[in-house]
Image (cartoon, helix red, strand yellow):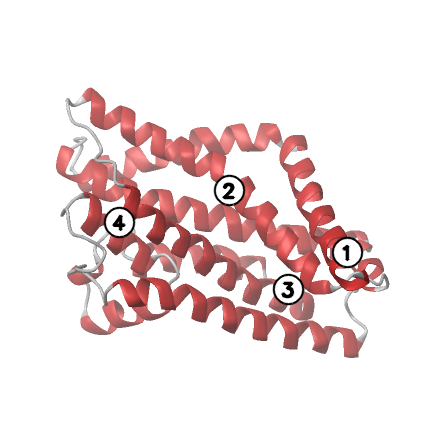
């Protein structure tokens, strides 16, 4: 019973620490809850040549909500590791009997929770914009599956970036560039079907939000069931891709973590 109890303590402690950081950084959160919705509206205006076109508001909204979540989740968990490295706290954590798996999972959960307010602010802005134009956003419980796939796949990607942080430390630019890549190749703003064949294939294969965004558009805008999703590789890939990304992320993080521990550089910056 000692191992499960230690795991639970480590997990709960990391979640609590992440939520305390969210509370203490409420001013930053407020700014993000304003700027990201404005960015969404500016994108629609740009794509609509100065007009908030109804045919763009909902498709872009679905992609922008996913992109906002990915940006916030990845950056929050990345900066939590980098902050602990810079302050010398991370190395002390590894000197305790708490399993690192519980700490990693706790950080991922805390980051996902912390990403929700900004993503929901974008969603609320989109709903209001559509309503002002006399429309409405369809509601369908089946989108919970692709939403869960986006959350899980993002965690896998964050594990890779956090593992790289343990070894290489100064990789802040990588996280920012990665989000830009997801925006361009993940089908968040432009459907993957409108992209060149190689970009469409790689985006659907590797970008954690791509299958989920395509599935949400098929369900909400096309009225398709989960068993008949025409825009991607089907519901099987919507489920399989995030699982594969999490497995790959867990392996990569474990190996990079072991490398940093062997070098004795966990707390070195």
In the current view of this chain or complex, which residue is farthest to the front? Answer: 1
Label 2 close to label 1 by CB (< 8 Å): no
* x 55%, y 67%: residue: 160
Q: Who comes first in sequence, dot 2 or dot 3?
A: 2
Q: Label 4, label 1: how many angstroms apart (C-alpha)?
A: 38 Å
Q: Who comes first in sequence, dot 2 or dot 1?
A: 1
> Tag on residue 165?
3
Could you say which is closer to the camera, residue 130 or residue 14? 14
Q: Who comes first in sequence, dot 1 or dot 3?
A: 1
Disc 4 vs disc 3: which is toward the camera? 4
**Residue 32, horizontal then vertical, whole percent:** 49, 34
Q: Residues within 10 Å of mark 2 (few under 14, many from 20)?
A: many
Q: Is residue 269 visible?
A: no
Q: Label 2, label 1: how many angstroms apart (C-alpha)?
A: 28 Å
Q: Is residue 98 visible?
A: yes
Q: Residues within 10 Å of mark 4 (few under 14, many from 20)?
A: many
* x 60%, y 29%: residue: 26
Q: Is residue 256 above or below residue 105?
A: below
* Residue identified by numbered label 1: 5
Quadrant in the rendering for residue 172: bottom right
* Residue identified by numbered label 4: 216
Side (left or right) of 152 relative to 28: left
**Residue 131, horizontal then vertical, whole percent:** 21, 23
* Residue identified by numbered label 2: 115
Which quadrant does the C terminus fall into? bottom right
Q: Who comes first in sequence, dot 4 or dot 1?
A: 1
Label 1 close to label 3 by CB (< 8 Å): no
């Amino acid at each position: 019973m000692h191992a499960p109890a230690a795991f639970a303590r480590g997990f709960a402690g990391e979640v609590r620490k992440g939520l305390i950081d969210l509370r203490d950084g409420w001013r930053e959160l407020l700014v993000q809850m304003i700027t990201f919705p404005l960015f969404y509206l500016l994108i629609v205006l740009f794509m609509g040549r100065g007009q908030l076109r109804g045919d763009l508001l909902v498709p872009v909204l679905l992609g922008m909500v996913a992109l906002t979540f990915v940006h916030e989740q990845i950056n929050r968990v990345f900066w939590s590791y980098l902050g602990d490295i810079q302050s010398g706290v991370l190395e002390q954590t590894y000197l305790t009997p708490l399993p690192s798996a519980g700490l990693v999972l706790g950080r991922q959960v805390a980051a996902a929770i912390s990403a929700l307010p900004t993503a929901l602010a974008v969603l609320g802005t989109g709903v209001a914009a559509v309503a002002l134009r006399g429309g409405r956003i369809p509601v369908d419980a089946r989108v919970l599956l692709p939403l869960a796939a986006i959350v899980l796949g993002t965690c896998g990607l964050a594990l890779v970036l956090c593992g790289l942080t343990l070894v290489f430390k100064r990789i802040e630019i990588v996280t920012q560039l990665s989000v830009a890549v997801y925006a361009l190749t993940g089908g968040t703003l432009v459907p993957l079907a409108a992209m060149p064949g190689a970009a469409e294939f790689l985006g659907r294969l590797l970008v954690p939000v791509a299958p989920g965004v395509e599935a949400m558009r098929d369900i909400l805008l096309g009225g398709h069931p989960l068993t008949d999703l025409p825009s991607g590789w089907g519901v099987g890939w919507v489920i399989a891709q995030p699982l594969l990304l999490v497995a790959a992320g867990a392996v990569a993080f474990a190996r990079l973590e072991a490398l940093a521990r062997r070098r004795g550089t966990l707390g070195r910056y």
